[in-house]
Image (cartoon, coloured by chain):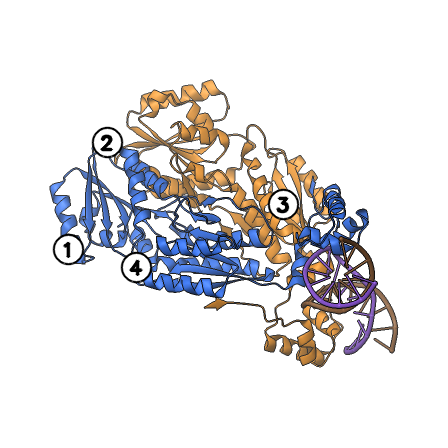
Chain colours: A blue, B orange, C brown, D purple
Amino acid sequence: MKTSSNKSIGIKEIAERANVSIGPVDKVLHNRGGVSKATRERILQAIKDLGYTPNILASRLKSSRDYTIAVLIPEATEIIPFWLAHNTGFEEALKEVSPFGINISILTFEQNNEASFKLRVDEVLHDGYDGIFMVPVFYDETIRLLQHYKDLNVPVIFFDSNIPGLSNLSFIGNNSKDSGYLAANLLDYTISKKGDILIASIERKEDNHIQFSAREEGFLTYFKNTGRRILRFTDNTGNEQTISKGISAIFNDNPHLEGIFVVNGIDKIAAAVTPAQKCNYRMIGYDLIEKNIQLLKNGAIDFLISQQPQKQAYQGIKLFYDYLILKKPIAPSYYLPLDIVMKANIDYYRFL
Amino acid sequence: MKTSSNKSIGIKEIAERANVSIGPVDKVLHNRGGVSKATRERILQAIKDLGYTPNILASRLKSSRDYTIAVLIPEATEIIPFWLAHNTGFEEALKEVSPFGINISILTFEQNNEASFKLRVDEVLHDGYDGIFMVPVFYDETIRLLQHYKDLNVPVIFFDSNIPGLSNLSFIGNNSKDSGYLAANLLDYTISKKGDILIASIERKEDNHIQFSAREEGFLTYFKNTGRRILRFTDNTGNEQTISKGISAIFNDNPHLEGIFVVNGIDKIAAAVTPAQKCNYRMIGYDLIEKNIQLLKNGAIDFLISQQPQKQAYQGIKLFYDYLILKKPIAPSYYLPLDIVMKANIDYYRFL
DNA sequence: ATGAAAGCGCTAACAG
DNA sequence: CTGTTAGCGCTTTCAT
């Protein structure tokens, strides 16, 4: 049972069969025009007949054309180290695709600063890239970028968060709503039938509210009509003491509280819960950043839903390879698995 | 912030710098000998100085050397359809590596039939492959194969299950013991403190007992010294009625039973549980085969631990690419993540 | 509109 | 032991 492939049918063979030289064949293959209709037909026929597949190695060898992808990504900060994780994915992907002339240029912006985003968009528009891989944080500027590239046939792929209905080529990331639903399903398993649930979040203006709302929506969808009592805690001070007091108050007022779903900033919420309190609650949240991994290991957090930033980065760059080099069709969206991470399997998720 | 790579330092440049022609340079690069020590040194130095990296595209283009990997894998049957899933992974990987001349040749054997395995080993030894990707089901024959390839520098990589301490190049798969521990951890979350647990399995002689024992060992490790009451049910008839009766008897005799860990054959066990009974138990087991996916969807199974067969196949073949084409060093083992799959995230795990 | 020809960087065979 | 040379399959330029 052999799965072979090498038939050595090349541009030469199809030229022969079509009674032309390789010149016109190449032109037809790349839609470069300048071929009479008749020979064009014959060549196309020959390509079909012989089942020709181009040798990407040879084509790449000669052409020496380079592709540079602009990566528009929020800056990793101490507060939001999440964006650091993508780097290993980019590196991994580059190892595979750089022989084919694909480079990337990472342009960071401040997640809470539209002006810094605009600056990068200006840069992208001015420098002219062969592809854009971006987190569409700000709507208007994203639209401006898409407008510019609309007719230029330059692939724009969103990652991490999506804005549906725009003219981008594709999206790669998680389905936030489903991730919330999953969190609910899992939490439901780990608490008693009568237990109350708290939805907690830390509001910061630099955050991606669309994504967080979607998580919450999915979570609530699961519990709709179940009669579960759902409480809410939202902090917008960022102050440890304030959070700690707020959480404590909720614990005291709600003796039946058993589960906590943290939409974002789980490290802050987990820190506000004392070990003694923790025994009575299950906590689930997001993001496999180092701080959270520690909290998972010491039992402060029970479950994390992983967004797999490395995978997003790796697969995303390979999409550009598929599109630019292999000329493969690209689906409008690629949803990555929603991984459930706990103490017992965290070590298998720490690297790509 | 550019991450570029193309410096166009080729074999020619290093020849120039070492004051030789490209002939000896190529020989040094491939350790083909026939180069005087002095020039060899100069060439090596030049390679270092200029930071030369070979252009794999060009090298591949010229050499047209083909590599064929023998894949020794159990036959998928109706009883054990598990092995079907690998195919999509093989296909996916081939898309990427076949331009580099890597082919695979799939040799199936009967999982419960050592003679059929021996036949395939004979075949492999006789035909002479450039790499072996295999499930080491039978010890003695595996040893025979390894012996033969020991000095031939042919990479042998195990997958799915491992036999440690042998001379194979690497292993890729899951850590079975950790997967059992994970199952225990998760099940522990979903049942009450006082609930009893049942470990169920269907013994078939064609199964991989090493792997199953490891799962059980990991599971028991978690509960050691916790005071949990652990029951056991082992069927070796394969008969539906018998299983059904056995399970029912256990349910009746053990009112505190809350969790069921199924080491293997979860479809059989799940079928033996009536929907009415199911409300009172949590069931966790293995293998993302179609039958189990349906049972997960209709609630008969709560959790499946995925072995990611597609990923094993995909990554495994890419290891041969790393080794044979890129000449990268290969680690002795690659453990894939232990994915927790439930109704709410199954759809994201159905394909590669 | 088509054909001829020069390489891309590397391998491998051969001549010196 | 070292240098030369002919391609691998394709792209691209330049005549025709």
Callout 3, which amino acid?
Answer: Thr
The three-letter code of the residue at mark 4 reads: Asn
In the drawing, what numbered circle is on residue B142?
A: 3
Report the disc number at residue A242: 1
Q: CA distance from mark 3 to mark 4?
A: 59 Å
Q: Secondary structure at mark 3?
A: helix
Q: Which image quarter is the N terminus of chain A in?
A: top right
Position of residue A350 in the picture relative to residue A251 (left or right):
right
Identify the disc placed on residue A112.
4
Q: Amino acid at mark 2?
A: Lys
Between marks 3 and 4 in the image, the one whose residue lies nearer the viewer: 4
Disc nearest the viewer among 2 and 4: 4
Q: Position of residue A275 (x, y in %)?
A: 20, 50
Cα–Cα gap, marks 1 and 4: 23 Å
Which is closer to the viewer, label 2 or label 3? 2
Q: Secondary structure at mark 1?
A: helix
